Amino acid sequence: MQDAKFTQLYQMAKKELLEDILPFWMEHDVDEENGGFYGVVTREGEPVKEGTKCLVLNARIVWTFTSAYRILKDEKYLALAKRAYDYFLAHFIDKQFGGCYFMLDSKGNPVDDKKFVYGQAFAIYALSEYCRATGDTAARDQAVAIMELLEKHAYDPAHPGYIEILDRDWTYNPGKQGSNINPEGESTKTMNTHLHLIEAYTCLLRVLPTQEQKAKVRQHLNIMLDKVYDKDIHHFKMFFRDDWSATSPEISYGHDIEGTWLMMETAEVLGEKDMEEKAAPLCLKMAEACLNEAILPDGSMIYEYNPVTREIETRRSWWVQAETVVGFLNAWQMSGEERFLDASLECFKYIDRFVVDHEYGEWFTMLGDSGAVLSGYESKIDGWKCPYHNARMCFEIIERYENKA
């Protein structure tokens, strides 16, 4: 018999996914004029027809509807997944140099052709999931082709890890680094890119179970545990030089709690007892640190903290709350400690009260302390506001609950 609180989480997740998140994207984001999906949609569900189409958003759309089909077995989600996949291959893949463009205009023409490693990771993630759900090995082969380009051009063998951005032809220009790099200018590697590379390479391992891929995924997990994870404070460090020396003290609680369950997922997919035993205590300690330091009385998680200046960023980001629910659910399943399940449920209740837009559908992006939407975050869909974190939260709850039933 399932725990009553887990059952409540499950019921909330199914309702939110099936009645709010997926319907909003299906009803408001399909671009019948130019193909694929709109890149920008207002709060009310009106498309901004000239909005750009970002690699990150479109890869996440492929991943989301593919996962929806795999888990829910409904053909309508497969149709959306195929639409997203076909558009992705036709417009985002660089036919000359390989890999993916970062940004297209509304017509599907490249307007930013740089190779953001973070974006390439999401391409691998999406294509691997598409193969996993449909059996289409061409999707897996495309994911492998992108991975091989990263291994050739973005991987640093001297200090194992990956740089951030390369030009269209995969040349590296240190002066053209971008979104994940901290403003000090010293950083060449980041936690955020490596966190999403590990989920991408792990998903590819599910459909490419070779010894070579296992070795690469094992290396990714060791990088996260040995270089990115700070064993003194049980948080991720965020920005690094070539040699993995840290360049800033900030703590990003959303990435921390997300990393706790993603690293355990990697260890489980690897199926190697020593890696599970290495990862598990660190992941639980990081979940506990997040619980003790970042959860507010209303159940939400704050954004960031600088332990040097003691500045607290209390904005409530939609994706941080989604990852909080999954991370604490995972910690409860690992430890059996009820406080983690309580924290997961209380955060979902906060999401339902404040983050879900019960008038127009989907989720608000960024809230202040009062629960009001912050200025500049009114759009429901843009390059970074996607169906991936919140739908994935629901997928994780559903799968974990049904697999235990």
Image (cartoon, rainbow, N blue to C red):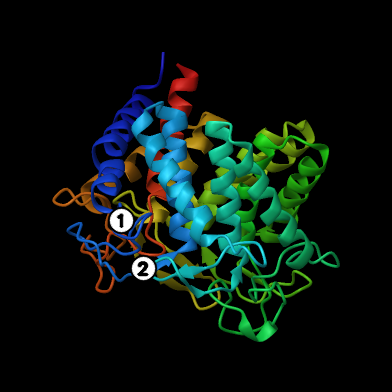
Q: Are marks 1 and 2 in contact (CB under 8 Å)?
A: yes
Q: Where residue 162 appears, x then y in whole percent?
A: 71, 65
Marks 1 and 2, the one that precedes in the sequence: 1
Q: Quadrant of the N terminus?
A: top left
Q: Where residue 37 appears, x then y in whole percent?
A: 35, 55
Q: Quadrant of the C terminus?
A: top left
The residue at the far right in this view is: 158
- The circle drawn on residue 334 is none
Q: Residues within 10 Å of mark 1 (few under 14, many from 20)?
A: some
Q: Is residue 176 above or below residue 54?
A: below
Q: Mark 1 = which residue?
A: 31
User: Residue at (38%, 47%) from the top-left corner?
Assistant: 390
Q: Where residue 150 appears, x then y in whole percent?
A: 71, 61
Q: Nearer the viewer, residue 10 or 14?
A: 14
- The circle drawn on residue 106 is 2
User: Can residue 341 be seen here?
Assistant: no
Task: Check disc 2 and report its element: helix, strand or loop.
Answer: loop
Q: Is residue 165 above or below residue 405?
A: below
Q: CA distance from mark 1 to mark 2?
A: 9 Å
Q: Is residue 100 above or below residue 66?
A: below
The amino acid marked with disc number 2 is: Ser
User: Residue at (43%, 58%) from the top-left corner?
Assistant: 57
Q: Where residue 313 appears, x then y in whole percent?
A: 40, 69
Is 179 displayed left or right of 8 in the figure? Answer: right
User: Can residue 58 be seen here?
Assistant: yes
The amino acid marked with disc number 1 is: Asp
User: Residue at (24%, 73%) from the top-left corner?
Assistant: 375
Is 199 displayed left or right of 358 in the figure? Answer: right
Task: Check disc 1 and report its element: helix, strand or loop.
Answer: loop
Which picture quadrant has residue 342? top left
Q: Nearer the viewer, residue 270 or 146?
A: 146
User: Residue at (43%, 65%) from the top-left corner?
Assistant: 108
